[in-house]
Image: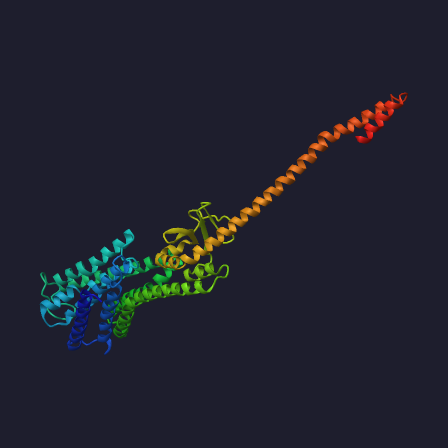
Amino acid sequence: MTPPRLAVAALGVLAGVGNLAITLASEIEPPFVFTPYLGLLVGWSFIGGGLIAWSRRADRPERRIGALMVGIGFAWFAAGLTRIEVSLVASVGSALSGLWTALAIYLLLAFPDGTLKTQLDRLIAGAIVFDTMVCQLLVLVFSPTIETGASNAFVLWPSQTAADWIAVAQQALLIAIAVTVLGVFAERWQSASPPLRRALAPVYCAGAVTLALITATLLVSRLAGGSLPGAVDVGRTMFSVTLVALALVPLSFLAGLVRARLARLMVGELLVELRESRAPGALRNALARVLHDPSLEIAYWLPDHEAYVGVDGRLAELPAQGSGRVTTVVEHDGARVAVLIHDASLLDEPELVAAACSAAGIAVDNERLHADLRTRLEELRRSRLRVIEAADAERRRLERNLHDGAQQGLATLAVELAMLADHVESDPAARRMLEQAQDEL
């Protein structure tokens, strides 16, 4: 771990310990005795998971996600400043209490590449910033006290009624945003390819459960404010469960990293398998298993013919655009040796496909040479077949010409000689010559 990340890790440890100490020393009773430790788990899980993702290569989207998770962890601990019995510090903590929510929503919308993809995503991100930051500042402008009961250092026009109405609108907007994000999850899941679904599943499941629990907790807390019997206890329990679900969000992201690492280990096993097995079709079967695409095919490039052929040496057709199947070029020593014809959904896992192509490069080149030999043998077979077919055609042509030309002419001549023999009965010498001509004919 580099010095900057070590410094961030140290600050994260100090922030967590300080937050726990503030919570335990506060006069505000937590819902359950273990709730402060769940809060510590939430902050540290985001910071720890973020640092692990942050350690990825600079060109990897996981770095952006990692930095965002680290920010969520520190923003979570910053919200604990509201428990400090110093008006200004508690007011600053109240102003920042919704920052982690805004960052968490942004994280879920930007997963897995760290960027907002659609106009709706940007609209939701803007709405959550307005809700958690702008509306919270408006509450502080009117409220004489903050949510923990400490005096508000930022109050300008004391009006608890106005503050309460803004808080109600703030909660209603947060519920609407959570429901909208759940709808975005459903739409993305429905349109995602199988590999992308495997990547989205852990984070989307944990995020969806967390958003649903936050929505339910806000509704229950509103009912508790109306003195509904039992609502307070239910709300306290749901809050603790929400903390557990929230702590699982960064862990689910790390599960995706582990899955990607396991996929690379399978590529390593592919190398061993290819060295040990030379059976026909073993390469295709191994690649299909590693890439989770049973329909995968290999087309080998023959430079002399400037064409792709299958393992049997016959010409292979590449998929047309829009067919749902695409090609990935396999190179060996910088030269094109083949293409993998696979499902278009594998475009969502370019690293895995590239690693599999790199691992199988030598084996593909060897099979390409075998395919080249089969192609040449096939060409020789077709050439011999063409010679035989040409000879048969010529023989049939000669037969036809004899039948339609010379044969009929000779038959006509035989008839004419027979007719002539009737006219030379008186000349024995001429008769003998005609008989000899007929016999020869």
Please state which of residues 305 and 114 is positioned toward the viewer in this rendering. Answer: 305
Q: Is residue 423 above or below residue 182?
A: above
Residue 42 location (% of width, % of height): 24, 70
Please state which of residues 136 and 223 is positioned toward the viewer in this rendering. Answer: 136
Please state which of residues 120 and 173 is positioned toward the viewer in this rendering. Answer: 120
To which quarter of the image does residue 18 belong? Answer: bottom left
To which quarter of the image does residue 16 belong? Answer: bottom left
Instruction: Name the image quarter holding the N terminus.
Output: bottom left
Instruction: Name the image quarter holding the C terminus.
Output: top right
Residue at x-position 42% and y-position 65%: 272
Please state which of residues 226 and 199 is positioned toward the viewer in this rendering. Answer: 199
Residue farthest to the right?
426
Q: Is residue 427 above or below residue 284?
A: above
Image position of 19 (left or right of 261) = left
Residue 112 location (% of width, % of height): 30, 59
Residue 156 location (% of width, % of height): 9, 61
Could one spot residue 310 in this view of the protein?
A: no
To which quarter of the image does residue 218 belong? Answer: bottom left
